[in-house]
């Protein structure tokens, strides 16, 4: 019996790597002679770097400017000449307390510092993940760290932060292009929002970062001026480009000035880890994440794993902290059965605190049920 274990992270409890180890132990408890392949996955968001480290990447540490200028100890991963940079390591929402003032002031300068460090270290390719940022500056700070000259109408340098974009009159990207050289850039995101419009970065993501109605309008106006200035500098038009609004527009800045293309974060990770080869040869796949819900069905890793397994005719079971999907919804996603830790713990806090032990114990029970031909549980837990 060959089993592939391919979970995403259990946020607040376990990394994807830790979750895979606990689930793998449960499989071996149930079927001691099973061949178990641990293939932790990610969707390009938080936790992606942990998966890349497990795949053999090298961790590179660097202190950079945080989203509000305070120093942040960030890091990225280098694997086979490619630097994988999580924007949130430098300017993540966890570095701030969201407020209207923060929504206007937060910037991406530290992300540019990480890219510059990677290029100086010889990276030939950059993969930038853009989820979880505190900023809505269209990647302006990132490009300034790479040498962009961003000027107002009087020729003075524009300050950092999304709120400062309302002053932008012109951009010079000469130094950015010199530093980038022939290095290629890819943006990992499953967000398809454009930079501007009703589904753009400011109205959709700004409130998550503390922006009220006034701040959203200022950010929207600033991003519009920023996009116009980039276009005048020779960059492609950004306003309606899918995924340009991801990460508060940092994706759009990378597309315009670094020649980046947006790709599925899940697909990028799968490409690196070789999980599809393992799935193709498996008898069973087990996936999961902290919360298996309708968002999981929209491009998240468990849905991607289930779709992959379905292409190869391999059954899929899921284990999660909580499951907010019905049995029919799981089945439509290609998942034969699921198990939620909160159904086997005294409280949500207990499930989070003892996630590894609970995963091991109840994965074993789930696998035994599947092996013995019993119908796996599919009842959803809702909160």
Image (cartoon, rainbow, N blue to C red):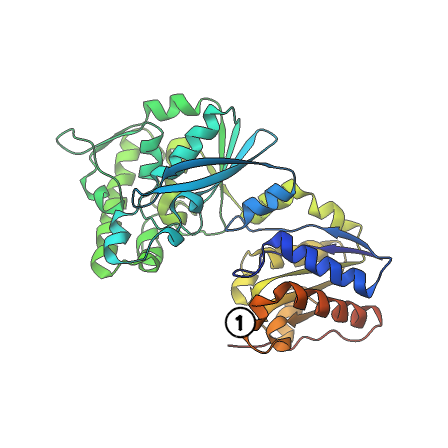
Residue visible at 58% across and 58% down in the picture: 14
Residue 291 appears left or right of 358:
left
Q: Position of residue 9 (x, y in %)?
A: 58, 56
Q: Position of residue 284 (x, y in %)?
A: 77, 59
Q: Nearer the viewer, residue 369 or 56?
A: 56
Residue visible at 48% across and 36% down in the picture: 61
Q: Residue furthest left?
A: 154
Residue visible at 56% across and 67% down in the picture: 352
Q: Secondary structure at mark 1?
A: helix
Marker count (numbered): 1
Q: Quadrant of the N terminus?
A: bottom right
Quarter-wise, where is residue 357 in the image? Answer: bottom right
Task: Sort mark 1 into few (<14), some (14-19) or many (20+) by Cα contacts within 10 Å.
Answer: few
**Considering only vertical position in the picture, is 370 above or below 242?**
below
* Residue 324 in view of the camera: no
Residue 80 appears left or right of 187:
right
Q: Nearer the viewer, residue 258 or 192?
A: 258
**Considering only vertical position in the picture, is 315 above or below 193?**
below
Residue 164 appears left or right of 364:
left
Residue 68 appears left or right of 284:
left
Quarter-wise, where is residue 231 in the image? Answer: top left
Q: Position of residue 66 (x, y in %)?
A: 35, 43
Q: Position of residue 173 (x, y in %)?
A: 32, 27
Residue visible at 72% across and 54% down in the picture: 311
Residue that label 1 marks? 349
* Residue 352 in view of the camera: yes
Q: Nearer the viewer, residue 153 or 35?
A: 35
Q: Residue furthest right?
A: 33
């Amino acid at each position: 019996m060959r089993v592939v274990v391919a979970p995403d992270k259990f946020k607040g409890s376990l990394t994807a790597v830790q979750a895979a180890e606990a689930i793998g132990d449960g499989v071996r408890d149930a079927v001691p002679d099973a061949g178990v392949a641990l293939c932790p996955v990610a969707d390009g968001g938080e936790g992606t770097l942990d998966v890349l480290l497990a795949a053999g990447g090298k961790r590179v540490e660097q202190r950079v400017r945080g989203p509000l200028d305070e120093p942040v100890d960030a890091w990225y991963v280098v694997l086979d000449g490619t630097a994988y940079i999580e924007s949130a390591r430098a300017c993540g929402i966890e570095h701030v307390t969201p407020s209207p003032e923060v929504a206007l002031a937060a910037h991406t300068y530290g992300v540019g510092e990480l890219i510059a460090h990677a290029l100086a270290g010889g990276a030939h390719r950059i993969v930038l993940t853009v989820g979880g940022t505190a900023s809505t500056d269209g990647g302006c700070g990132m490009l300034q760290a790479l040498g962009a000259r961003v000027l107002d109408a009087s020729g003075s340098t524009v300050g950092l932060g999304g709120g400062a974009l309302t002053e932008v009159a012109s951009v010079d990207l000469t130094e950015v292009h010199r530093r980038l050289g022939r290095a290629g850039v890819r943006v990992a995101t499953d967000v398809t929002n454009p930079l501007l419009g009703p589904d753009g970065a400011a109205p959709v993501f700004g409130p998550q970062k503390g922006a009220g109605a006034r701040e959203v309008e200022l950010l929207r106006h600033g991003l519009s001026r920023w996009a116009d200035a980039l276009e005048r500098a020779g960059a492609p038009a950004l306003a309606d480009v899918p995924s340009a609004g991801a990460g508060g527009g940092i994706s759009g800045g990378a597309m315009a000035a670094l020649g980046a293309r947006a790709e599925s974060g899940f697909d990028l990770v799968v490409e690196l880890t070789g999980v599809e080869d393992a799935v193709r040869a498996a008898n069973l796949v087990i996936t999961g994440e902290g919360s298996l819900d309708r968002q999981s069905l929209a491009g998240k890793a468990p849905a991607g794993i289930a779709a992959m397994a379905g292409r190869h005719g391999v059954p899929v079971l899921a284990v999660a902290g909580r499951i907010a999907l019905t049995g029919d919804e799981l089945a439509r996603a290609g998942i034969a059965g699921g198990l939620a830790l909160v159904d086997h713990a005294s409280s949500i806090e207990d499930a989070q605190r003892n996630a590894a032990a609970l995963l091991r114990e109840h994965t074993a029970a789930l696998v035994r049920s599947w092996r013995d031909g019993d119908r796996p549980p599919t009842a959803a837990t809702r909160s």
